[in-house]
Image: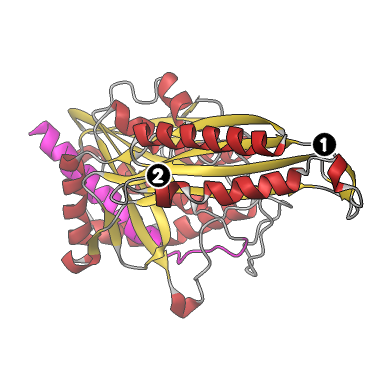
Amino acid sequence: MLDLLQQINNQFEYMVAMRRYFHINPELSGQEEKTQAKIMDELRKLELEPRKCGGTGIVAELTGGRPGKTVALRADMDALPLHDELDKPYCSQVPGVCHACGHDGHMATLLGVAKVLSDRKGELSGNVRFLFQPSEEHLPGGALNMINAGGLSGVDAILGIHLWQPLPLGVMGITYGPIMASANEFCITVLGKGGHASMPQQTVDAILVGAQIVNALNTIVSRNINPQEAAVVSVGVFQAGKVYNIIADNAVIKGTVRVFDLELRETIFCRIEEMVKGICAAYGANHKLEFYRGYPPVINHPEIAAIAAAAGQEALGEENVWMIKPVMAGEDFSYYLETVPGAFWLVGAGNAAKGIVSPHHHPQFDFDETAMIHGAEILLRTTLKILADLTG
């Protein structure tokens, strides 16, 4: 049997080809039909029997040569509604849609892992379940649909990775507890009274009211939240008005709330509601307010995270496994970790020397494809360790 790293390296060209195929042919959340078909074809080549799950998702089981427990490995599939500005041969060919968060690499990495494990299945004590999950980028996410469709039935542990541009190539970032935040949304509609810009006394200016609301929202974290607690309130949309000499009669404000404590989320939502009501009343406006409670925080199980960290040290060296501070991004991998023990970690994929510096969700986002080797090796080593521990 070949050395594990040699087996992974042998799959690198395949992983690159798969990654670039997915990047050229991205599909939005819930629309991953062609991606689903491609992955199922690749899994059938490994003599696996993939089945559709959770809509456009996929489940496939690799049965080891000896009885044992089952470890699930998950990759997300969906792209973003963003025009690809990457000046590379594998630039997206779908207008207004691109893989700007690395999900193309996640799928390719997991397919590479599936190929290696298929070659080693005779020596496996237990089973490995491959989960290709749609709709991570769009609430309510795709994880719950996968779980409800039986994706975790009989699973003893689950693992997931994210290729992470902010970390340099060759580094693994992990925690033994919270690693990603709960991501939530709010939408405020200010209902004012429009009119001619020369006669503002006859109007209720929705832009003015909305501006006061935006300013007030930016004080919540600094003045209403304990400084020792992590929270983010950010406004990403402020839409109002169409003509320069007409006072807008409505304004739409949308934003996100990120926390690790769900009670704190409710505190922030309550404060948003108080501010919106008070400011609108003061200016004589009405309002609509909607909250969208998103994914829970991603909280690693310490015992599984410790195994993953040990695997990372074997793959990358002890000095390159970093205990990181939790990040405020969100991930519906949290639902899996609420159901079975598991861990989620970040694999360094940035490389300034190659000009790979654009952040996630940027139209010029890219990652160093060598990171897929690191991601695959750590996933494989962690999987083999967990199966050995559970069987023992």
Quarter location, residue 144: top left
**Residue placed under numbered mark 1 in the picture:** 193
Residue positioned 65% across, 33% down in the render: 281
Query: As displayed, is residue 290 above or below residue 348?
Result: above
SS majority, magenta:
helix
Q: Which dot marks residue 363?
A: none
Residues 12 and 71: in front is 71
The three-letter amino acid code for the residue at tag 2 is Asn
Residue 27 at what x, y percent from top left?
63, 43
Callout 1 secondary element: loop
Real-space Cα separation, disc 2 to disc 1, in angstroms: 31 Å
Residue 238 at what x, y percent from top left?
68, 48
Residue 12 at what x, y percent from top left?
41, 61
Query: Dot 2, how many residues are within 10 Å of its Cα: few (below 14), some (14-19), or many (20+)?
Result: few
Quarter location, residue 38: top right
Region of the chain picked out in magenta, as a range:
363-392
Query: As displayed, is residue 93 above or below residue 184?
Result: below
Q: Any magenta on residue 114?
A: no
Residue positioned 13% across, 39% down in the render: 388
Q: Are marks 2 and 1 in contact (CB under 8 Å)?
A: no
Query: Dot 1, how many residues are within 10 Å of its Cα: few (below 14), some (14-19), or many (20+)?
Result: some
Quarter location, residue 389: top left
**Placement of the C terminus among the 4 image quadrants:** top left
Q: Which dot marks residue 224?
A: 2
The three-letter amino acid code for the residue at tag 1 is Lys
Q: Is residue 328 left or right of residue 30?
A: left
